[in-house]
Amino acid sequence: MPELTDDTGHVTGDTTGHAGDTAGRVTGRVAGQPGTWMTPAEYGASRAALWTGAVVLVTDPDGRVLVQTVDYRPDRLLPGGAVDAGESPSAAAAREMREELGIDGHYPRGLAVDWVPADTPGFPPEMGFPGEILYVYDGGTWTPDRIGAVRLPAQEITGIDFVEPADLPALMDAGDARRTLAALRARIAGSGPVLLEDGRPVAPTTLDRLGVLRTRRTPGRGAWHPGPVPAGLPVRDRSGWLFAPDGRVLLLIARATGAAHLPTPHAEPTAGAVPLGYRYVDQGAHARTVARLTAVSAHRDPAYARLLATPEQVRELCDWGAAGRAELAAVHAARAQLSLPAPPRVPPTELPREGARW
């Protein structure tokens, strides 16, 4: 950064050179050495001017994302808008939710901060769009009662929908869709706020690299039944909740599609396998087994990435409907019976190709 002078040309401030120094402080060089000299007015004029915006990501209990239809553009938007002069981004998010949806709330948790470049398509030249810093806040999961409390204003917002994450690119501007999916992956991962540039993560997580949620989740909404599959009921498929010692489970991600799948019960060496329950779908059973992993073998199928994830993360990456809550409760009961810990939400870990052993 340049050194600063007062209007007479004398160096002002100290010579610390710390990042973030502003007018009235010498930055980047030691006094007396050659450099670029600016008055405070010149330095202020040299700084980039950007808009600031705030939006809120809300999902329903099935993991679908709330988007708005507006009367001034054809594509869908997350609720939110511009940060007013002197207003904090979190205050703007709360104000916009109240104005646009009639919902009072407080949104202290950030999911993403995105730098939107000045040459982003879609802004009329006469608007003089200088670029924007856009904050994405976590609006949480809304219950049917909260959704029913939405009250739209008389103009601007003409409707809301909850949509499958994979449908966002077809409904939203490309940059908005990238930003929304990156924020949603950050929420599922529990990785903390992510930094984005034009909707793209600066440091992609495992979920970003594998492109999870880029294709529609396979519906599996059959009713949940605990215990073994009854005699005479056809078994359509079998999958397993296979626990690592830290309480997380094995999850497969198809590299070609980003789709999430539980493995088959015998995909890896296990101990203590027992029937957990089944889903009744298409006049048949989708059976679930629970077991403790004793090892993960060397990778045999390059079409899939193998991750360790919390049971909650598995459910959020799958479309199981309301019965998913009952299945999740059964999974945690089984985990406790195996004397395994309840895992905290941490980013899913991709297992090495050579496998693992405990």
Image (tube, rainbow, N blue to C red):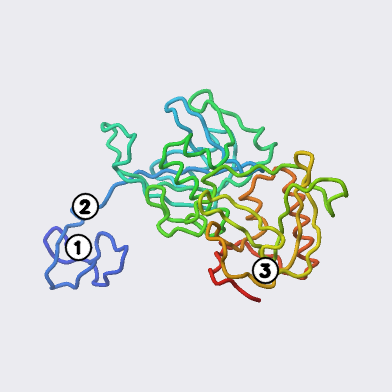
- Which residue matches tag 1? 2
Please indicate whether residue 10 sits to the left or right of residue 231 in the image. Answer: left
**What is the distance, in whole Å, between disc 2 and disc 3 at their CAs?**
54 Å
Q: Earlier in the sequence, mark 1 or mark 3?
A: 1
Residue positioned 16% across, 60% down in the render: 6
Residue 278 image point, x, y percent? 79, 50
Asked whether 191 or 322 is in front, the reply is: 322
Q: Are marks 1 and 2 in contact (CB under 8 Å)?
A: yes
Asked whether 341 or 40 is in front, the reply is: 341
Quarter in which the N terminus is drawn: bottom left
For the residue marked with disc 3, what is the amino acid?
Answer: Ala
Asked which secondary structure carries label 2, the reply is helix
Residue positioned 32% across, 62% down in the render: 20
Quarter in which the C terminus is drawn: bottom right
Q: Quadrant of residue 141?
A: top right
Q: Are marks 2 and 3 in contact (CB under 8 Å)?
A: no
Which residue is outermost to the right?
Answer: 231
Residue 194 image point, x, y percent? 46, 56
Residue 7 image point, x, y percent? 14, 58
Please indicate whether residue 210 sits to the left or right of residue 318 in the image. Answer: left
**What is the distance, in whole Å, between disc 1 and disc 2 at their CAs?**
10 Å
**What is the distance, in whole Å, between disc 1 and disc 3 at their CAs?**
54 Å
Viewer-side label of 1, 3: 3
Asked which secondary structure carries label 1, the reply is loop
- Which residue matches tag 2? 46
For the residue marked with disc 1, what is the amino acid?
Answer: Pro
Asked whether 271 or 120 is in front, the reply is: 271
Residue density around tag 2, few if under 14, some if 14–19, many if 20 or more, within 10 Å: few
Q: Earlier in the sequence, mark 2 or mark 3?
A: 2
Residue positioned 69% across, 72% down in the render: 294
Residue positioned 52% across, 59% down in the render: 192
- Which residue matches tag 3? 244
